[in-house]
Image (tube, coloured by chain):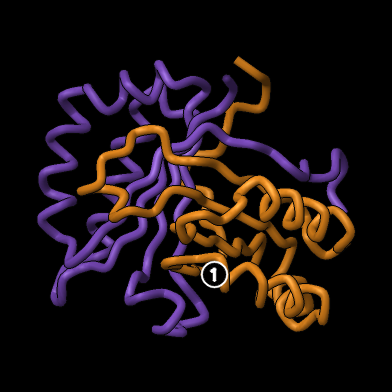
Chain colours: A orange, B purple
Amino acid sequence: MGEVKHLCLVKFKEGVAVDDVLKGMTQLVSEMDMVKSFEWGQDILNHEMLTQGFTHVFSLTFASADDLTSYMNHERHAAFAGTFMAALEKVVVIDFPVVLAKPPPLLPA
Amino acid sequence: MGEVKHLCLVKFKEGVAVDDVLKGMTQLVSEMDMVKSFEWGQDILNHEMLTQGFTHVFSLTFASADDLTSYMNHERHAAFAGTFMAALEKVVVIDFPVVLAKPPPLLPA
């Protein structure tokens, strides 16, 4: 099994300082060596019918399922997750082995 | 603005031939040059409280928002999307410019 991703779709509660949450998450994963990479984004289409109200995506990539487990069980993740979850109105979390069905071109276009 | 992702979280209707849907999607994006890369995955944690019943993730990466628009407006996407949406019990779609907060290491670990 290759890379594993930990993906969160969230809708923040009203009044939450989203920038602070983003800073905290970026800081956390930058210091956790088992996190291979981290990207996030904010929806730009705003079709409520399609987004179901979710506004942000957070995607952590791990080299293996063991690294994901190690991250999930780390006390610093647990501490952050408590604060994070309290800031959310709703959330979906999916963890999945990555199937790269169409790889990116080797050279930048 | 750099890469843009088109992300779908889905729960299929009972009885849907998921493998056929996956084959159709892989075939479609492999023939659409504006799709830079395509990956998908199936949840392995199965915590209903976290997954909200969603089981699969589909993630398409585009080099630009223009490429995403070009894909969304393509007649072949429209044809596939009709069949795809009919196979789903529920779906969330998010489109977002990628913020790469922690890039992967340059060399494989």
- Amino acid under label 1? Asp
- On screen, B52 above or below A24? below
**Residue A109 placement, left or right of A57:** right
Question: Residue B57 at x, y = what percent?
Answer: 41, 58
Q: Residue at x 55, y 58 (%)?
A: A98
**Residue B65 placement, left or right of A59:** left
Question: Residue A85 at x, y = what percent?
Answer: 57, 72
Question: Would you say residue A44 is visible in this rendering?
Answer: yes
- On screen, A44 above or below A40? above
Quadrant hosting residue B103: top right
- Comparing A93 with A104, the one in front is A93
Q: Give the residue pinned by disc 1.
A: A95
Quadrant hosting residue A1: bottom right
- Comparing B34 with A41, the one in front is A41
Quadrant hosting residue A66: bottom right
Q: Residue at x 57, y 73 (%)?
A: A86
Question: Would you say residue A10 is visible in this rendering?
Answer: no
- On screen, A88 above or below B21? below
Question: Residue B88 at x, y = what percent?
Answer: 18, 62
Q: How many marks?
A: 1
- On screen, B78 above or below B33? below
Q: Residue at x 40, y 16 (%)?
A: B66
- Comparing A34 with A58, the one in front is A58
**Residue A54 placement, left or right of A102:** left
Circle 1 sits in a helix, a strand or a loop, which is it?
strand
Outermost residue to the front: A15
Q: Chain of mark 1?
A: A
Residue count near mark 1 (Cα–Cα under 10 Å), binned few <14, some 14–19, many ≥20: many
**Residue B75 placement, left or right of B38:** left
